[in-house]
Image (cartoon, rainbow, N blue to C red):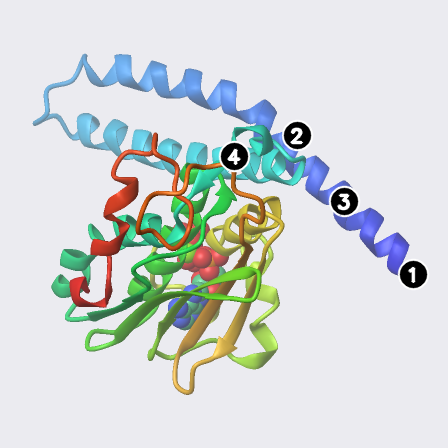
Amino acid sequence: MLDQNEFLIASLKQVSNDIAHDMRRPLARMRQNLERAILTHAPSDPMYEQVECAIGELDAALEIFSSLLKLAQLESGAWKDEMESLDPARLLGSVLEPYRSVMEDHGQHLLGEIMPTCPAVIGHPVLLRQAFSNLIENAIRHTPGQTTITASIKSSGNSIHIEIADNGPGIPAEAMQRVFDRFVRLDTSRTHEGNGLGLSMVKAIVRLHAGTIALYDNSPGLRCVIQLPQELHPTATIWPGADFPRRPDRPGAQSAGNVDAANF
Ligand SMILES: Nc1ncnc2c1ncn2[C@@H]1O[C@H](COP(=O)(O)OP(=O)(O)OP(=O)(O)O)[C@@H](O)[C@H]1O
Ligand SMILES: [Mg+2]
């Protein structure tokens, strides 16, 4: 029974991947035609606004198809050979910084607990950046003003724990697993923007890194914990005074010590 269900889910995923793949080209052509059409109307013409609106809707559809394709590629192991040794604390710090003003605008507070020196992980910087951003954006988008959002990273055993938590409304226990499925948005979030693909993307990225992601009740709020395996046999040079190896060729590799709790 389980096998049959797994087979059905895999077939459904395949169909949605095929649709995403095949629909992108005609939609992109339609967009080009609309771009040409808009040039024939003055901005004061009501038709201009309608064409502009149609372009916006198409962009939203194209974004969904791109996300579905990216998910399919992640699940098939793409980008694995583009991974490198990186400092996850430094990466998290750089992802958080631009969100600070967005949170302030929403009346939300950011607290950070980023260890000054962090063991490296083997990862894809762009994908990990996206995973961290998705969780931070969720904490901003799905919670009200006055919410405190906490970002922390620590090392335990042979793994690195990255945690994004908030004290907002949280997710009911029965939905904690379901929210990782594609297009799932809880009723409380229907009024917010979003496609219900962010957490599916985080899960696929974390899996590609041989890690795990878990959601917990933060009483109140949501606590998301990503666990990534630490790089076990770093090939990098050991910098004098550093308590873990850093790659000398990474820009700013030595300055991770500046990314600490005081900065957040
Ligand atoms: N921090 C949070 N607090 C409360 N609910 C959350 C939180 N994070 C996620 N959720 C719930 O989980 C659902 C799925 O999240 P997910 O990130 O997959 O989609 P989304 O944020 O709605 O859209 P997007 O595709 O833009 O990320 C959200 O719609 C929301 O209902
Ligand atoms: Mg999201």
Name the quadrant of the N terminus.
bottom right
217 is higher (above) or lower (below) than 100: below
Q: How far separated are the C-alphas under marks 4 and 3?
A: 27 Å
Amino acid under disc 2? Asp
* Closer to the camera in the image, 96 or 257: 257
Dot 4: what SS? Answer: loop
Of tags 2 and 3, the one toward the viewer is 3
Of callouts 1 and 4, which one flags the residue occurring earlier in the amino acid sequence?
1
- Toward the bottom, the furthest residue is 219
Amino acid under disc 4? Met
Q: Is residue 188 visible?
A: no
Of tags 4 and 3, the one toward the viewer is 4
Of callouts 2 and 3, which one flags the residue occurring earlier in the amino acid sequence?
3
How far from the left and from the top, in percent, is residue 196? 48, 55
Task: Give the labeled residue for mark 1.
Answer: 1
Q: How far separated are the C-alphas under marks 4 and 2?
A: 27 Å
Where residue 176 sits, quadrant-wise, is bottom right
Q: How far separated are the C-alphas under marks 3 and 1?
A: 14 Å
Task: Give the labeled residue for mark 3.
Answer: 10
How far from the left and from the top, in percent, is residue 115? 33, 63
Q: How far separated are the C-alphas under marks 1 and 2?
A: 26 Å
Task: Give the labeled residue for mark 2.
Answer: 18
Q: How far separated are the C-alphas under marks 1 and 4?
A: 37 Å
What crowding class fits label 4: few (fewer than 14 Cα within 10 Å), some (14-19), or many (20 or more)? some
